[in-house]
Amino acid sequence: MKYNTIKITPSEAEKILLELYGIKGNASSLPGYVDFNFRIKIENEEGYILKITRPEENKKYLEFQQHVLQFIEINDESLIAPKVIKDKNDDSISEITDGFGKKRYVRLLTWVSGRVWSSVNPQLEDFRFSLGKQCGILTKALLGFDHPEAHYNFEWDIAQSLWTKEQLHLFTTDKKEILSYHQDNFEATQAAYLSLRKSVVHNDPNDNNIIVSSDVLNPKAIAAIDYGDAIYTQIINDVAILCAYGAMGHNNPLDASLALVKGYHSTFPLEEEELEHLFHAIAMRLVIIVTRAAMSKIEEPDNEYLWISEKPAWEVLKKWHKISPEFAHYCFRKACGFTAHPNEKLFNNWVSKNHFQISVLFPSIKLNDAHHIDLSVSSTWIGHLEDFNNLELFQFKIDQLQKEIPTKIIAGGYLEPRSIYNSKAYDRMGNHGKESRNIHLGIDYWLPATTPVHTLLDGEVIIAVNDAGDKEYGGLVILKHQIKAIPFYTLYGHLSVKSATKNKVGDVIKKGAKIGELGNYPENGNWSPHLHFQVMLSLLDYQVDYPGVAYHSEIEVWKSICPDPNLLFNSEPLQKKEETSLKDLINYRKTHLGKSLSLHYKIPIEMVRGAGQYLIDSLGRKYLDTVNNVAHVGHENYHIVKAGQEQMALINTNTRYLHKNINALAKELIETLPPELNVLHFVNSGSEANELALRMVKAVTGEKDIIASEVGYHGNTNMCVDISSYKFDGKGGKGAPEHTHIFPLPDTFRGKYRGNHTAEEYANEVREQIKNIHSKGRNVGGFIVEPIISCGGQIELPKGFLKKAYQIVREARGICISDEVQTGCGRMGKTFWGFQLHDVVPDIVTIGKPLGNGHPLAAVACTQEVAEKFADGTEYFNTFGGNPVSCAIGTEVIRTIKSKNLQENALVVGAFLKAELKTLSKDFPIIGDVRGQGLFLGIELVDLQLNPLAAQTNYLASRMKDFGILMSIDGPDQNVLKIKPPIIFTKENAEELLFTLKSVLSENFLKLN
Ligand SMILES: Cc1ncc(COP(=O)(O)O)c(C=O)c1O
């Protein structure tokens, strides 16, 4: 029957409501799969849902549905669910006759208010857990309920889903393949599946049937609605349906379903046997969705609601097809608190009683003691990544170490987060941004090539191949062993190809027999010779490429599938040691380090390695860094590191001896500065540079009154804090000292004067401050400002302001300082120094952060005149400033900027990023302003009335961190996101940043109402 001919209008619904229930209300249509549903609104009341069936529905089945709701109401009073309202005749189901003389049934239920699950964005772990939990509570409430009508033929029942096989002709070949794969898998497990626990369940906890609390930041599932699909079936089917919908829209659907399963299990404990069928049950719900959708498109082409889930269901199905059902099963087990691998306990029990000497594995070496080597991401032994990737150098270091410990075998690596696997082949897009597969699952034994490898136990060859890809195993053998009825496997990687392939699948190798020999590079996968030895309780579906490293997010499951190989040897140096936890680090800091130190993020990150524009934490997670303008030419830039290391090995003294390094650095800097600024003093920090600049002001002018900008920051020493409004006007501050004179933040977006023609107005404010100083009978000493005010929120000075301000200050015989601690060294793109954007030449320039690329090095550049006046007879001595190591580093930084054209990179990538951010601001009105130059940008978040949105800015930065992108916040109202990455930042990095920003900006908390 055509959908349109049986449709009921809202005004018809209102009439029906009045007639049957005596209730007057406003009806509006709701989407419905079978029934015609109306939301009934009544002033000051929650209202109702009126449900009118299609013609000729089965009344008995409706009675069953009403009984379900009535059972819940009695059985669990705390559970929020629609309540049955009886009509004037005290019936819970009423009858009407439609225009065609057909009987239709009517039901009225209370309205459960709230938003639906599908409206929640983002759907984080806690929320997903609550979805599972709520469904578990519902299953529990329905336990013990039964009804004759609950046992019926229903195409949406997973248990009956094999009907879909008859509809395969509706699909193309590739889709057919996916569908039959799941149908066949489900069919093959029928016998066990049919014996699982059964009950009446909701059977449709989809993303439009779960009601969620209104808390935007911490939403929780609170109720399920629409019990129209309830049926007596396997309980696991309800979990499967929840997961099928919960997996939609996620990069990793398996990962997305785990919190749901965990939540469900927390309120309705699942059984191990049930979990064995969950993967296939989820697949079959998806198969039903896409099959039903394909049929509905033919049957009722004008009812789009019938196939709303088709596209996302196909997306999950395609991904589900590539997931190992066995691996998924282990993940579900882990989520429910069982050992991920069912045989884990048995293996551990066996291995605790069966230990071997390492010399059984390598009889020719005759050594049993191991020496643990740390190759983790935080290992200082491996040093710089480039050195680590230098095979000859690495081999040399291994050989040296072996000479120092001739009686020991160098080994280690189980569960180590490694940073070697930095090729893109080891990256994937997870549900929280990119993740790298880098946690090592085996133990490496570093021994010479051709060292023979023998078996510990009788074993059958399962795999013997050449797997020599990039950083793969080379010659690989996997043996199968048997402990009573339980199989387990040992893997031998990086063998010589010949010795590995000499073994044939099916060969039986007797305990103690030789398997093969260690390979040399490149045939062993291009590694220093070593054996990668791994133990597995299961082979999963792998043929050749059994993973030797795993994603951190899955490590708890992998740990169970691949137990510690050292359990076989019980070698003390290789036993896993307790690591210092984040908690320990934080607690120690809280007690013994400065109390006013702060930490980024609610859960602070322990960073252990830098690499270019990335920072890597102790678990090996890579973060794209848009914060660190100190690591100017890239974190741990190889040439900078080398320059420092090499000079450190020679000499490090002070400036009282001659050394060419200090001259070299001065020359490099002078080359970038205007000719007037040609004298340098080297110091150790930006604060020290500004401190020295202030002393120079006093020496030259004899005055100590300084004019500085509102929300400016110039350092942490006494004098610097005294001129930093950011500090003395900020939290804990005590206001401006007597000799500091603050002009308003020259912000053209939300400042005192706005628009593009405010240079004169802000310059007049500087003039006012000079008048103020004069009114006190004193004269101005100096004027200090950054060319883009960083802590002020990346405030670009209005065009022409600086020129006018300098003129006014100089007319009053003051000295002009440009604080280039943040803006200098090519970051601006168009110019090397920030002041050059404004066509002025300061008397003093202070340089800091980028100059040492992380090493404490800063400088003050000034004119000959300033330098002469400062040299009044008192020696300027600085113990560390200008030492040969710092100068070697600084020189290499400036040379790198020049030789790699990094200023040009800042210009090109910065311009691209700024333009794209401006485009983004059109789609997301919360972005009020995008500003800055080169790779020194700011995004200001405001509401429609330009009020600052600090909580939203904080949320955005924190969510970006969740996706692996570091961003910082500043501005007087803490509503400006700053972008100031190492200037090697690429267009690809900018694209990743934009992509992630766009995704996070779509989240509910960032929507303007
Ligand atoms: C503009 C500006 N000047 C000076 C300083 C002080 O530099 P440092 O922390 O190296 O002492 C900073 C530090 O953030 C700064 O941003």
Image (cartoon, rainbow, N blue to C red):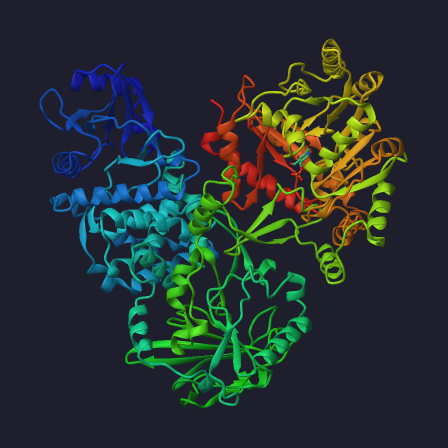
The total number of labels drawn is: 0
Q: Is residue 230 left or right of residue 493?
A: left
Q: Is residue 480 above or below residue 304?
A: below
| Quarter of the render that holds ligand 1 | top right
Quarter location, residue 224: top left
Question: Can you see residue 922?
Answer: no
Q: In this view, does 955 lie above or below 894?
A: above
Tell which residue pokes out farthest to the left in this image.
Answer: 89
In terms of depth relative to the viewer, which is nearer, 974 or 948?
A: 974
Tell which residue pokes out farthest to the top in this image.
Answer: 775
Estimate the x, y position of residue 716 in percent, counting from the top left: 63, 34
Q: In this view, does 981 lie to the left or right of 836?
A: left
Estimate the x, y position of residue 434 in percent, counting from the top left: 53, 50
Q: In this view, does 102 lie above or below 231?
A: above
Q: In this view, does 715 lie to the left or right of 165?
A: right
Q: Is residue 850 above or below residue 113?
A: below
Residue at (65% x, 26% y) in the render: 722
Estimate the x, y position of residue 93 in percent, counting from the top left: 15, 29
Residue at (24% x, 25% y) in the render: 50
Q: Is residue 769 left or right of residue 349?
A: right
Estimate the x, y position of residue 275 in percent, counting from the top left: 28, 58
Tell which residue pokes out farthest to the front in this image.
Answer: 873
Quarter location, residue 450: bottom right
Query: Which quadrant of the rendered structure holds the N terminus?
Result: top left
In terms of depth relative to the viewer, which is nearer, 745 or 661?
A: 661
In terms of depth relative to the viewer, which is nearer, 225 or 570?
A: 570
Question: Can you see residue 663?
Answer: yes
Quarter location, residue 870: top right
